[in-house]
Amino acid sequence: LKVVTEYKSPGKPSKVTEYGATGVISEYTVYEYNAVGMPAKTSTYDFTDQLKGYVTTLYDAAGMITKVSSYGPTGLLKQYTTMDYTY
């Protein structure tokens, strides 16, 4: 197994590609960030470039995660988790 990580800015991966034992891509993950640089969407694709699913992350004004949602390849919500904080 070989993993290659691409970066668009320091410390923030834009794409992670996994290769199988034969050197062929098995899957890859694309990372998107919101306006303040926090991870907002992570999409995973198979070796044929078909979307396997994606995860979105929402934050409050303090930068704390408030909701993480997981979607299937058609965009159908599979599950979500919400977080509440006391400030």
Image: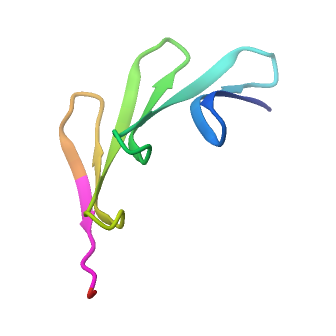
Q: Is residue 45 or residue 56 the one in the foreground?
A: 56
Q: Quarter of the image for the N terminus: give it.
A: top right
The percent position of residue 2, horizontal first and vertical second, equals 80, 29
Left or right of 83 in this view: 40? right
Please name the colour scheme applied to the rendered image: rainbow
**The quadrant where residue 71 appears:** top left
Residue in view at x 21 percent, y 33 percent: 75
Question: Vertical placement of 40 versus 84: above or below?
Answer: above
Residue furthest to the left: 76
The percent position of residue 72, horizontal first and vertical second, equals 29, 37
Q: Quarter of the image for the C terminus: give it.
A: bottom left
Left or right of 3 in this view: 81? left
Question: Vertical placement of 18 versus 48: above or below?
Answer: below
**The quadrant where residue 80 appears:** bottom left
**The quadrant where residue 42 appears:** top left
Residue in view at x 43 percent, y 48 percent: 38
Question: Vertical placement of 11 versus 16: above or below?
Answer: below
User: What is the span of residues highlighted in magenta in the rendered image?
Assistant: 79-85
The percent position of residue 69, horizontal first and vertical second, equals 27, 52
Left or right of 44 in this view: 68? left
